[in-house]
Image: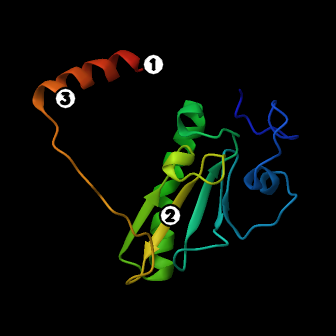
Amino acid sequence: MSTDDGARGDDTGAPKTIFGKILDGELPCHRIYEDEHVLAFLDIFPLSPGHVLVIPKERKAFLHELSDDAAAAIGRVLPRLARAVMRTTGATAYNVLQNNGAAAHQAVFHVHFHIIPKHGDRGLGIAWHPSALAGGDAVALVERIREELE
């Protein structure tokens, strides 16, 4: 099954995502930044003032599906956008969030990054439940991941 969100939806017949509709000019957005590969705009349901969404123009549902060029384009603009959001909002802290898959809380199946300024109790709240990594497990995991690198 393809997750490409083309002009008429993906090749499975699924409808376009809201971000696909924004890219195609079918829905408006509060545009902050745009270049040939990336669009950034205000989230219409912000967790805090200055909550920005950054999307690739390449229409893929998951980060691991993006081309290296699309990923690099996002990587180049994220720090610039974060600096602008911090200066504009006066925030001294922020989160960059990117979810992949429904189980990871992804709601729109088009790759997107959130820049979420932290203003007191406004912003992203997370629970972190770390566990210990055994030395032998780490060595085996590193080897397996390295084998999978493309």
Mark 2 secondary-structure assignment = strand
Q: CA distance from mark 1 to mark 2?
A: 28 Å
- Identify the residue at the far top of this view: 147
In the displayed structure, 84 sits above or below 141; it is below
Q: Earlier in the sequence, mark 3 or mark 1?
A: 3
- What's the residue at 51%, 46% (across, down)? 103
Q: Which residue is mark 1?
A: 150
How far apart are the alpha carbons under marks 3 and 2? 31 Å
* Residue hosting label 2: 115
Q: Is the C-beta separation of discs 3 and 2 under 8 Å?
A: no
Looking at the image, tell me whether mark 1 or mark 2 is earlier in sequence order.
2
The Cα atoms of the two marked residues, 3 and 1, are separated by 20 Å
Of circles 3 and 2, which is in front? 3
Please report the residue visible at 60 percent of the width from the left and 61 percent of the height from the top. Answer: 53
Looking at the image, residue 36 sits to the left or right of residue 135; the answer is right
Residue type marked 3: Ala
Image check: 77 left or right of 125?
A: right
**Which residue position holds label 3?**
138
Of the two numbered discs 3 and 1 in the rendering, the one whose residue sits closer to the viewer: 3
Q: Nearer the viewer, residue 101 or 4?
A: 101
- Quarter of the image that includes the C terminus: top left
Of 146 and 12, the residue lying toward us: 12
Q: Secondary structure at mark 3?
A: helix
- Whether residue 86 sits left or right of residue 37 in the image: it is left
Which of pointers 3 and 2 lies earlier in the amino acid sequence? 2
Residue 113, quarter of the rendered image: bottom right
Q: Position of residue 62 (x, y in %)?
A: 58, 39
Looking at the image, which residue is at 41% across and 79% down?
A: 91
Secondary structure of the residue carrying tag 1 is loop
Q: Is residue 4 left or right of residue 107?
A: right
Q: How many marks?
A: 3
